[in-house]
Structure formats: C-alpha cells, structure tokens
Amino acid sequence: MREKLKSRRKFLGAGAATVGGAFAIAGDTGTRGAEQAPKEKSGIKITDLKTATLRANFDWHLIRVYTNAGVTGLGEAYWGAGVEDLIRRMKQLLVGEDPLSVDRLTTKMVRSMSGAGSQSGATVTAISGIEIALWDLAGKILGVPVYQLLGGKYRDAVRVYCDSGEGKTDDIGSWRERAQFVKSKNFNWYKFDCDGIPKDRARASQPYTRRADGWNRLLGEDDIRMIVERVTAAREVLGDGPSAPEMSIDCHWSFDARDAVRLAEALAPLKLIWLEDPVPPKNWAAMKFVADHSPVAIATGENLYTKYEFRELTQEHACDILHIDVPKVGGLRESQRIADMADLEFIPTAIHNVASPVGTLACAHVAATIPDFLALEWHSVDVPWWAETVHYDGPVMENGFIKVANRPGLGVELNDEVCRKYLEKGSTYFE
C-alpha cells in the first residue's frame, strides 16, 4: 500500500506539468471550426439526426443532429453491433424538440428506449453519442464551449496516456521494438497489455504445459515470469529515472483474484500507476479482494453503464481508480455524476477511450470539469490518419496533453473529405 501511495504522489506531481515540446498530433488548423451561435436563439428545433461509421482500430459511430437554424451538433457513440441502427431509431424522439433541453431529452431517450430497469448495453451507448452531439449543439447555439455548460473547467489541458498494446510476439525483442515505437510519440505515460502473454493463452488446443490452459484464469509461475520479463523490457526502453514516463498495465479481465494479486506483487518493482481490470467486472467482492491486497493501484469501470452500475463499486471501495468510458457510460453529464460519486469516496477518475478525435475531445471537455481527474486514454497510436479526420484550432494533442479549445461546442468539425475515405462498408455518410 505504501508503494501504491508513493506511485500516485509521483503521478500527481507529473500531472501538474505544463504542455510543451515539439511533438503534436495535429488536426486541420484552418478556420472551419465550430459554427457560431445564431442571432435568434428562440424557436430553434431539432429537424434531423444522421450517422456515419468510420472503420479504424474500432468502429467510430459519428452522429450529427440538425436544426432549423442551420446549426448542427456532432457526437460519437462507443463501438458495437447494432449501435448505429439504435441511434437512427431515436430520431423520432428528437425531431421537433428544443435542442437546449439536453438533460430532458436524454432522460426521454432512456425512458423510451431502455426503460427504468434496463439502463445498460448498446442502447445506453447509442444515447451517449446523441447526448454528446446535443451538448455540442447547445454550445454552438449559445456561443460557449461545452465545458462551460458543464460548470467550467479546472484545467486548461488534459493529460493523455498512450495505449501501447503489446509486442507482436512473445520475444523480448518484439516488446522492446514496440516500446521504442510508442516512446517516439513523446507521451509521459504509456499503458501496455499483459493478458496476451504467452501468446498461446487463448488457444486451448495447445499442450497443457502451464496452469493456464487457454480457458481458465489461472497464472502459473512461468506465466508471471514471462509477463514480468516482457513488461520490464518495455520499462527499460522507456527509462526509469525521475523524468521517465509513467507506466500502467492492462489485464483485460483475464485472471482470478489470488493470481491477480500475485501478478501485482511481481510487477510492483516497476512502479506502475495502475493495474487495470485484473478480474472480470461486476463481482465487486473479488475486485475488492484484489484492491485490498495489491501493492499496485487497481483501475476498473470501462464495462459499466450509468451511475447505477458504479454505485456499489465506489461505495465498497472495490478499486483505487475509476475508469469510465464517456461515449458508452451515458454521456458527458452522466460521467460527471459518476465522478461525483467517486469523489465522495475519495476515488479519482480516469477515462477509458477508443474514440475518434470527436469522442476524444468530448472526453477532454468533461475531464476538464472533474476536480480529481487523472488522465484520458488515447488508443489510436496505430492509426496515422486519426487527427486528419477533423478540423480543430491547432493540434488535437501535443506531448501527451489536449488543450481544450475555447470555441463554441466541442470546438471541432469533421474533415468530410478524409472521413469519406474510411467509411465502414455498409454505412452511409450522414444520408
């Protein structure tokens, strides 16, 4: 526990760093940013809702909400089968409505589409993306940034960590190569995956040579040794001095509780910020056992929907860091509510994120409004055209920080020419 607190103090100190340096993930820096507020704000009504899905590392479900004033709102929902269809089905609930009534419209969608007792799954994901688009629209109508509508910001720049995956093979050289690649992107925090070590873990047809046979959640001594050796190789590339980047490990819900603790103990010398999702979600007794016994902070939450599913997790202190996914959990306002619940228990919030620049910048707006916020994930290091899909006022991201734009709405618009190149097969581009 002492090592865990020491690691967090180091993190918070690094989090106070200012934005600087040369590396930037740039978007279009032209003047085609968010539309300005219309002169006449009364009588504005929603007239249409359309979607487009781009294919990248994940499906990016993009949403536009249209009005009779010519102003549009832009949002993004988490990926998943059927999400785009669900978004389109909600058009009937929005047409003719006042776009400034964001909370009421969100509640209307929840009650109409999911019911009081079924606030989870793809339906909430779809609603999340529309809610983001409504906030963008409201900000443009009123001529203020979204973060201002959510209560104002605590920080001008949001810290971002780079999801780095893993080596292509079990070979330590492959891990060093991967670490060298992501290090060149100039972030100050990287996350690697460990659930794919060894590579035959997911193939039950392999000879039973370890306790982990491809189906169970057990970790043998050889498994832990392999994980530690490869993660250590990545750490050696990143460096280990006072100015070295931070590091976290993602387990993707793969292990049982006792073996997760054994793994955390073995990884503790690497001074990780967190061990993410070591056991499957929603068994808070098991997660609490790991959190209580792990020398490394435990992060979880990306598989949960709405504040109702986070209530027991926070009240039971079953994790050290809450890890929410904004375009999945219910949207911007719901993310604030969840962060407030966590704050009651003195649990900091981080954001899981696999989105395009649209969803990522929406996350940055809400992250700026959360007092006890740590960092926002970026999962697109292998998508070279990621930032080219939008027009933004300056770089979308620079040296591991997103500077939240002081422009109406989210401050971002799509680069239609680029986006059309990566349209998912079977999807239409806002038709």
Image (cartoon, rainbow, N blue to C red):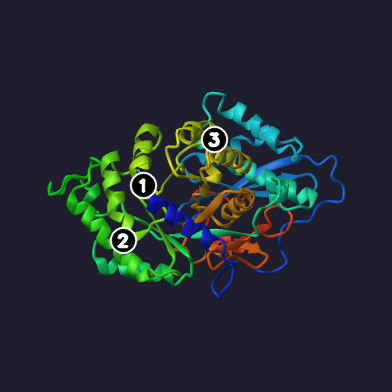
Please name the residue shown 62% across and 35% down the image.
Answer: 90
Disc 2 crowd rating (10 Å Cα; few below 14, some 14-19, many 20+) is many
List the residue tagged with mark 2: 231
Disc marking residue 252:
1
Q: CA distance from mark 2 to mark 1?
A: 15 Å
Q: Position of residue 337 (x, y in %)?
A: 60, 38
Q: Quadrant of residue 17?
A: bottom right
Q: Amino acid at mark 3?
A: Thr
Which three-letter amino acid code belongs to the residue tagged 2? Val
In the image, taking residue 57 as reference, residue 359 lies left or right, namely right
Which dot, 3 or 2, sits closer to the camera?
2
> Where in the figure is residue 20, as x and y percent of width and height?
58, 72
User: Amino acid under label 1?
Assistant: His
Q: Is residue 64 left or right of residue 380?
A: right
Q: Are marks 2 and 1 in contact (CB under 8 Å)?
A: no
User: Going 22% across and 46% down the picture, which residue do you hit?
Assistant: 219
Q: Secondary structure at mark 2?
A: helix
Q: Earlier in the sequence, mark 2 or mark 1?
A: 2
